[in-house]
Structure formats: structure tokens, C-alpha cells
Amino acid sequence: MALSKLARDFAREINNHDWQDAPYRRDRAGHDRASDTNHDDRVLSAQETDAVRTNVMWVTAQVLGYHDPNFDVYEFAEACGVDTRTRRGDRDGSIRAGVREQYGRYMRPGTWEFDPEFITTETSDFYHSGVDCPLFQRGYRGGDLLTFPLDSQVPTRWKRCACVAERQG
Ligand SMILES: [Zn+2]
């Protein structure tokens, strides 16, 4: 799955920025220490620089993931220049753990909440009021979440779970 143009552009800008003196100076976008004649001598270690870059990647990823259901945080992180592998070469799970996401759905930026909407999957028989429904969790077979606005008509191939009526009270 290709990154959106917006995600690619954020990644380019994050990857292009020299983060090693980020806490010490306001360096503007596209800062490069090598061509900066006015830099002082304080620099972060490689590990600290990586932490700054990774945090910038995560906050940006939260917004991009919220707006794009096809967003892939690993693809984005790599494009930002963040190492997504563990020392053994496996995919580093901490990359995904850095965004507020569940079943591929991202929390609304600036909050710890998912937008209220009906959810289901291709292989489900029912649609639910949210991923916290135990029947959804028990029946989840992997795959992308399908979502529908609360004021929309969910296609009839999915039956309404009891959790929907409970939520509507
Ligand atoms: Zn349910």
C-alpha cells in the first residue's frame, strides 16, 4: 500500500531535517548542520537524535493515520528515516505501539477517543457500536475495519448487534 502524497511529503521533510541539535536552537524547516555556519557545539547523541526524529514521526503519524484508513505506520516511519527493525532484524513492535490505534483505527488527534461510528469487517455477520463490544472482539478474524457514520444506514448484509441498541440507550 503506497503512502498518500501528504504522508510522503511529511516523511520527506522529517527525513530531510537534521535533528541532532533540535533542543538547542530554532533551526527552521530543512535545517542542515553541515551547511550552518552559525551552529554551536551542542549536539545530541545518535540515540537522542533518533528519539527526537521518532517522536516527530509519531505525532505526524497520528494525524495521517486518523485521516487515511490505508495509512501504514511502518512504511511512513521508514520513509522518515526511522529504523523499524529490532537488532535481530524483526519488525519492531514499538513503532506501532507509539500511535494511539486499535484494529487499524486511529484515535482523534489531540484526544484519547475514537470517533463514534459503527464498525464491522468483511467477514462479520454483525455491525457494532465500537471495538469494545465483547462479541466483536470474540468474532474478530483480522482484516481491516469497516466503519459507518452513526447517522448512516449500514448495508443489510450486516445485522445489528445488541450493543448498538445499548449504546443508543
Ligand atoms: Zn456488538
Image (cartoon, helix red, strand yellow):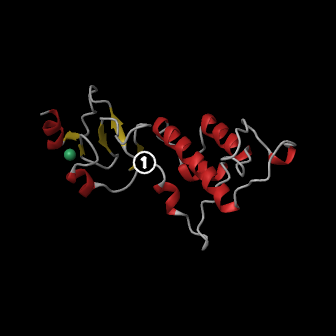
Residue situated in front as seen by the camera: 149 or 64: 64
Query: Residue 12, how many percent across, how many down?
Result: 70, 42
Mark 1 secondary-structure assignment? loop
Residue 42, percent from left and from top:
75, 53
Q: Quadrant for residue 114, please give it.
A: top left
Residue that extends furthest to the top in the rendered view of this protein? 151
Q: Which amino acid does label 1 sit on?
A: Arg
Residue at the spot 76% in from the left edge and 41% down from the top edge:
31
The structure residue drawn at horizontal position 70% and vertical position 47%, both measured from the top left corner, is 15
Q: Is residue 154 left or right of residue 83?
A: left
> Label 1: few (<14), some or many (≥20) within 10 Å?
many
- Residue 8, position in %: x, y? 65, 40
Look at 54% across and 49% down and name the residue there.
73
Q: Is residue 55 left or right of residue 19?
A: left
Quadrant (top left, top right, bottom left, bottom right) of the C terminus: top left
Q: In this view, does 82 lie above or below 117?
A: below
Q: Nearer the viewer, residue 59 or 73?
A: 59
Left or right position of 135 against 108: left
Judging by the rendered image, the residue that carries numbered circle 1 is 100
The residue located at (74%, 47%) in the rendering is 18
Residue 150's x, y, as percent?
27, 30
